[in-house]
Amino acid sequence: MPPFEPYSIDGPQTWEWRGDEATRTRRAVAMLASPELVGNKQVLIALCRIPAGEGAPWHAHQDHEEFTYVLSGRGQFLAEGRAPIGVVQGSLSVIPPGLRHRHVAGADEDLIFLWGYAPPGKQLQQ
């Protein structure tokens, strides 16, 4: 028997605004699949929208590999100790565990990307 039932959702998804009061950043997340949402065990999948000119706070996932795939907009992927990388529609970033990183939207349009990490969990370090 599979660990969870097959799961499928149609859009549009509900964006939940999340912010970091210390850095005054805003970003919206639409959670698509997680153990809490559908009972899957191996991956967390979500959408993120960062408003034009803003960015996610610096953070790391100590025990998780993360990926981001840009659906629209342009901006930068920043990783500690590395040169900034420009991202546009179709850009893929794969982030190893423990690497501090963030995404920043360009000045003119929101940056929207699909992201996920495995295994799923809530182990963020700012």
Image: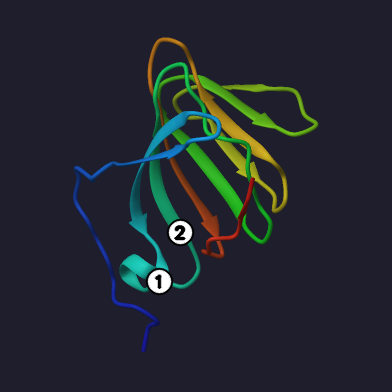
- Which residue was labeled with disc 2? 44
Residue that lies at the very extreme toward the top in this rendered image: 108
The residue at 44%/25% (across/down) is: 89
Residue that lies at the very extreme toward the right in this rendered image: 81
The residue at 41%/34% (across/down) is: 27
In the displayed structure, would residue 13 be above or below residue 91? below
> Which quadrant of the structure image shows residue 7?
bottom left
- The quarter of the image holding the N terminus is bottom left
Hey, what amino acid is under mark 1?
Asn
Mark 1 crowd level (few <14, some 14–19, many ≥20, 10 Å Cα):
some
The residue at 47%/45% (across/down) is: 115
At mark 2, the secondary structure is: strand
Foreground pick, 117 / 58:
58
Q: Position of residue 2 (x, y in %)?
A: 37, 83
> Which quadrant of the structure image shows residue 92?
top right
Residue that lies at the very extreme toward the front in this rendered image: 22
Disc 2 from disc 1: Cα separation: 8 Å
Q: Position of residue 72 (x, y in %)?
A: 38, 25
Q: Position of residue 110 (x, y in %)?
A: 38, 22
The residue at 22%/56% (across/down) is: 9
> CB atoms at circles 2 and 1 under 8 Å apart?
no
Foreground pick, 41 / 58:
58
- Which residue was labeled with disc 1? 40
Hey, what amino acid is under mark 2?
Leu
Q: Position of residue 56 (x, y in %)?
A: 52, 33
In the displayed structure, would residue 76 be above or below residue 124? above
Relative to 40, 78 lies left or right: right
In the displayed structure, would residue 122 be above or below residue 110? below
